[in-house]
Amino acid sequence: MAISAKDVQKLREMTGVGMMDCKKALTEADGDFDKAIEWLREKGLAAQTKKAGKVAAEGVSYAIVADNGVGVIIEVNSQTDFVAKNEVFQGYVKDVAAVVAAEDPADVEALKECKYPGTDRTIADVTADKVLSIGENIQIRRFVRYAEGVNVPYIHMGGKVGVLVNLAVEGIDPAKVIELGKDVAMQICAMNPSFLDKSDVSQDTLDKEKEIQLALMANDPKMAAKPEKVKEGIVMGKLGKYYEENCLLQQAFVKENKISVEKHVAAVAKELGGTITVKAFTRFATGEGIEKAEDDFAAEVASMIK
């Protein structure tokens, strides 16, 4: 019988197995999904189904600048740190990042449908194969791509944190700003700013911060009795501190904390005889926001000997 693409896609979603193997299984089973799944299990191909449901909270955050100057930062997750250090896994991450640079996919789902380098298969299909060969769930979580300007990557602790900085440069050889870009990237890695510049902080965020500071003063007997005008002045000072802590350009430069990042960038630009503007940055901390499963080792052992 004829096997439709829709049926193949359905089986793929049910099992996580590659498209070609799903089509073959359905053909062998005359379109019966239960028999197709059984066929895949017998061939050892559906073993990944169970793995695909496990939490992937480890992995790497990887940043590169491709030959075409495009900067890419990507996070790919695995279940364990051991696999994250595996050469096969790391090679896979680099290949996927190269596809992002070359193809400019709209999102992760579009990326999965791109061709994997050196093959005529999709990234989704190759990922399914990697799950089988490596033995763990693998998830492409997110990526950011900067096509313009000068891009500078930084990878910390083998991929625990990845940073990509995007600079606009005029009147300066781009090669001469790489050191500055690295310094800014390390600043971002260490200080984890929430915003690029104070102008990026929304009014809602400022209002909330103001509300918090006023509440703190209201609960402080020494501050509660002060005139409202005095309190307002104190709050404005606190907001200035908020900018210094949360906005990259207003932060104290870690290598010379007597000046801000903004002033340091301006000083380097003046020395090099041109202009440098930090246009954007992305910082990925691997696994951030993913709820990690707490394994009960004793319970696991007990279940195995029942």
Image: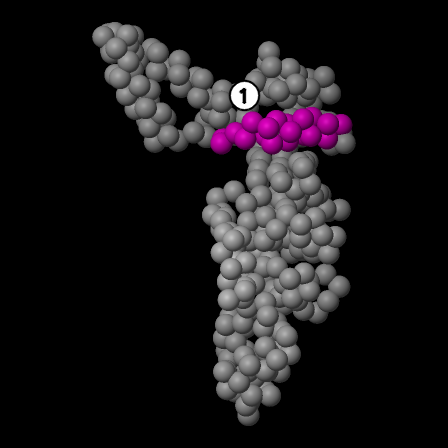
Quadrant in the picture for residue 154: top right
Residue visible at 60% across and 88% down in the picture: 28
- Residue 55 position, x and y percent, is 52, 55
Residue 168 seen in the current view: no
Pick the residue in front: 89 or 117. Answer: 89
Q: What residue is at 70 percent from the left and 43 percent from the top?
A: 65
Residue 256 can be seen in this image: yes
Provide residue 223's location: percent of width, then percent of height.
Answer: 28, 10
Residue 94, position as x, y percentages in the image: 70, 51
With 240 as the anchor, is 124 left or right in this view?
Answer: right
Q: Which structural element holds mark 1?
A: loop
Residue 265 to residue 149: above or below = above
Give neighbour class at mark 1: few <14, some 14-19, many 20+ (Cα, 10 Å): many
Q: For the N terminus, which image quadrant? A: bottom right
Vertical placement of residue 98 versus 39, above or below: above
Nearer-the-camera pick, 23 or 70: 23
Span colored in magenta: 176-195
Specify the quadrant of the image occupied by residue 129: bottom right
* Residue 165: in magenta span: no
Residue beneath label 1, please?
A: 251
Residue 56 at x, y percent in the picture = 55, 53
Magenta: main secondary structure equals helix
Magenta highlight on residue 192: yes
Residue at left offset 49%, top offset 32%: 194
Residue, x 59% and y 53% (percent of image)? 79
Q: Is residue 236 left or right of residue 198?
A: left
Amino acid bearing label 1: Gln
